[in-house]
Image (cartoon, coloured by chain):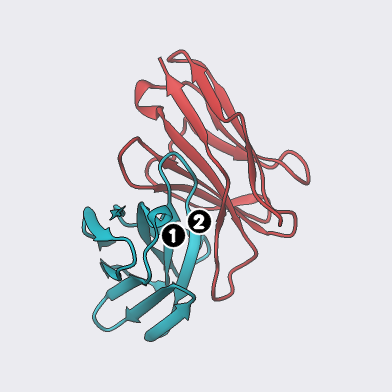
Chain colours: A cyan, B red
């Protein structure tokens, strides 16, 4: 089966850096995605990792360690608009290629 | 920028009624998906669709659910006899293919309320 864990909630200050962790146990791993979801809206793509290491994309970076079943999303220079839920999703190898989502981490950015 | 669209944005129905949720995936995408998200809970996979057939489905996707691609643009989810517990946000998504970086683009969702 699949199991994905993330912290439920985090709080950080505008301008700061925050790291959101994700651990997973799954068979047929084919990549890990991070999505941002504002309340009542659809998830939007942030980053993708399939190989170990760090992927940087502007203010957002994501890291993956396949051997440890671990990823993190790093958000720099936090802005108020970054207040949202951050979803870790594992892509499964196979014909369907569906995502298994974690429970999401609700980030609150305070002034 | 191309996007996935969904209609209606909000659907209210009585328990036992049939509903059809509609989606228009991004035009050059080949893989289509339905997910649902019960209020306050995580996003859950329902079904994936490729080459005019279901490629994978979850335990949630029982005989009450069906999907169809009736023409070259629409992708629909039908719930035959709705239950109270079907109340959720339903997201359609599409992706280009199976290659690495299989980013899925999500539509804005349909909020289904079953009374």
Residue that numbered label 2 is attached to: A44
Crowding around mark 1 (Cα neighbors within 10 Å: few <14, some 14 to 19, many 20+) is many
Measure how far apart labels 1 and 2 are at the Cα level: 5 Å
Q: Can marks 1 and 2 be said to lie on one chain?
A: yes
The image position of residue B96, as x and y in percent, is: 65, 64
Q: Name the one closer to the observer, A60 or A14.
A: A14
**Mark number, residue A35:** 1
The residue most toward the front is A111
State the residue in front, A11 or A9: A11
Image quadrant where one finds the C terminus of chain A: bottom left
* Mark 1 and mark 2 residues within 8 Å of each other at the beta carbon: yes
Q: Position of residue B105 (x, y in %)?
A: 57, 56
The residue nearer to you, when weighing B36 against A71, is A71
A17 vs A9: above or below: below
Residue located at (34% from left, 27% from top): B85
**x and y percentages locating residue A88 in the rendered image:** 36, 62
The chain letter for the residue carrying disc 2 is A
Q: Quadrant of the N terminus of chain A?
A: bottom left
- The answer to whether residue A24 is left or right of residue B27 is left
Chain for disc number 1 = A
From the viewer's perspective, is B77 left or right of A47? right
Q: Which residue appears at 38% of the width and 54% of the height?
A: A80
Rendering quarter of residue A62: bottom left
Q: Using the rendered image of the protein, determine whether residue B101 is visible from the camera's viewpoint.
A: yes
């Amino acid at each position: 089966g699949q199991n994905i864990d993330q912290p439920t909630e985090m709080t950080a200050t505008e301008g700061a850096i925050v790291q959101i962790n994700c651990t997973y146990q799954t068979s047929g791993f084919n990549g890990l995605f991070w999505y941002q979801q504002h309340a009542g809206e659809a998830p939007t793509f942030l980053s993708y990792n399939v190989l170990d290491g760090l992927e940087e994309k502007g203010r957002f970076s994501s890291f993956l360690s396949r051997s440890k079943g671990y990823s993190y999303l790093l958000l720099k220079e936090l802005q108020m608009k970054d207040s949202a839920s951050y979803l870790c999703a594992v892509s499964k190898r196979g014909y369907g290629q569906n995502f298994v989502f974690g429970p999401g981490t609700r980030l609150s950015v305070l002034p | 920028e191309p996007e996935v669209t969904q209609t209606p944005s909000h659907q209210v129905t009585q328990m036992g009624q049939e509903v059809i949720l509609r989606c228009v995936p991004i035009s050059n995408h080949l893989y289509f998906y339905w997910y649902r998200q019960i209020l306050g809970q995580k996003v859950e996979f329902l079904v994936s669709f490729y080459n005019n057939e279901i490629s994978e489905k979850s335990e949630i996707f029982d005989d009450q659910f069906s999907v169809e691609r009736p023409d070259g643009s629409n992708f629909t989810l039908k719930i035959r006899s709705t239950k109270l517990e079907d109340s959720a946000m339903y997201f359609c998504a599409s992706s280009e293919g199976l290659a690495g970086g299989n980013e899925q683009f999500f539509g804005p969702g349909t909020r289904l309320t079953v009374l």
